[in-house]
Image (cartoon, rainbow, N blue to C red):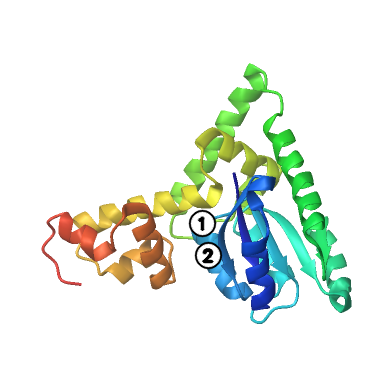
Amino acid sequence: MHKLFIVDDEINVLNSLKNNIDWHRVQCRVIGSALDGIKALVDIKSEPPDIIMTDIVMPGIDGLELIKRTREKGINARFVILSAYDEFKYAQKAINYGITSYLLKPFDDNEIYEIFHHINNEIINNEKIAAPDPRQDFERNDIITETKKIIKQNIRQEISLNEIADSLYINASYLSYSFKKKTGQTFSEYVNYVRIDRAKELLRVSKSRVKEIASAVGYDNYTYFCQIFRKITGMTPLEYRSCSNYDYQD
């Protein structure tokens, strides 16, 4: 099943898409939804989906900005644009972001199924890419090893898949695909795991406050850090520190 995230500022449209479409029919499951781009971006970073269906005109962050920021975070999801008739000119701009799937409101179920069947075929075809020869496989392993090294060396900095791809002189989409294929994790998932691993170490051995540790491992947003920490470890940072028998009050 492919993970789907839906964003639309019209609650009726959002609920209809979540509840009235047989997503299993197109090999999808809805993992989340949002009424605005700001909340969507936070949730998408926390659990990167395979497909994002988003409205164009929304409060906070519009659909095009959401696409841009998601790409910058190295989340290589496919996008389906939702657009009202008078917003169609905005949907056309999505072509600049490589988006070719969009639905014009009002749409019917068959249009949705048709687009998602097409997306499924693209995903399946990508997964069926012929296995590389030994030389290509060795080259891919080198790329992943170097990518991991760069991530660990820059744990405190904003880490972009696009910047790493540029530094390695390869295509960002190829790096994203290769990384997931070799590690079983998306780029952003791996970055979070590396950061939380380092945070766990600091919680065990240092006297630093949790907010300071969050910053030290690359999280400027303390609340977001705690959400990711709990998602990965099953407990809050303070609970983890307590379980590690470190006698320190934060």
The answer to whether residue 214 is left or right of residue 240 is right
Question: How dense is the environment of label 2, judged by Cα within 10 Å: few (below 14), some, or many (20 and up)?
Answer: some
Percent across and percent down for residue 81 are 77, 63
Q: Closer to the camera, 97 or 127?
A: 127
Q: Is residue 159 above or below residue 38?
A: above
Q: Is residue 195 above or below residue 39?
A: above
| x and y percentages locating residue 163 in the rendered image | 63, 53
Residue 248 seen in this snapshot: yes
Residue 73: quadrant of the picture: bottom right
- Secondary structure at badge 2 equals helix
**Residue 143 lies in what quarter of the image?**
top right
Q: Which residue is mark 1?
A: 47
Please tell me in which quadrant of the rendered image residue 64 appears. Answer: bottom right
Estimate the spatial distance between the alpha carbons at disc 1 and disc 2, rounded to whole Å: 6 Å
Q: Count every numbered label the image shows and give the total.
A: 2
Foreground pick, 117 / 69? 117
Please state the horizontal and vertical placement of residue 136, each as a whole percent of the image: 66, 24
What number is the disc on residue 34? none
Compared to 110, does 62 lie above or below? below
Residue under numbered circle 2:
43
Q: Amino acid at mark 1?
A: Glu
Q: Contact (CB < 8 A) between labels 1 and 2?
A: yes
Q: Is residue 99 visible?
A: no
> What is the secondary structure assignment of the residue under circle 1?
loop
- Which residue sits at x=48%, y=47%? 190
Mark 1: few/some/many CA within 10 Å (<14, 14-19, 20+):
some
Residue at (44, 48) in percent of width and height: 152
In percent of width and height, residue 184 lies at 51, 38
Q: Residue at x 59, y 44 (%)?
A: 1
Q: Is residue 9 above or below residue 115?
A: below
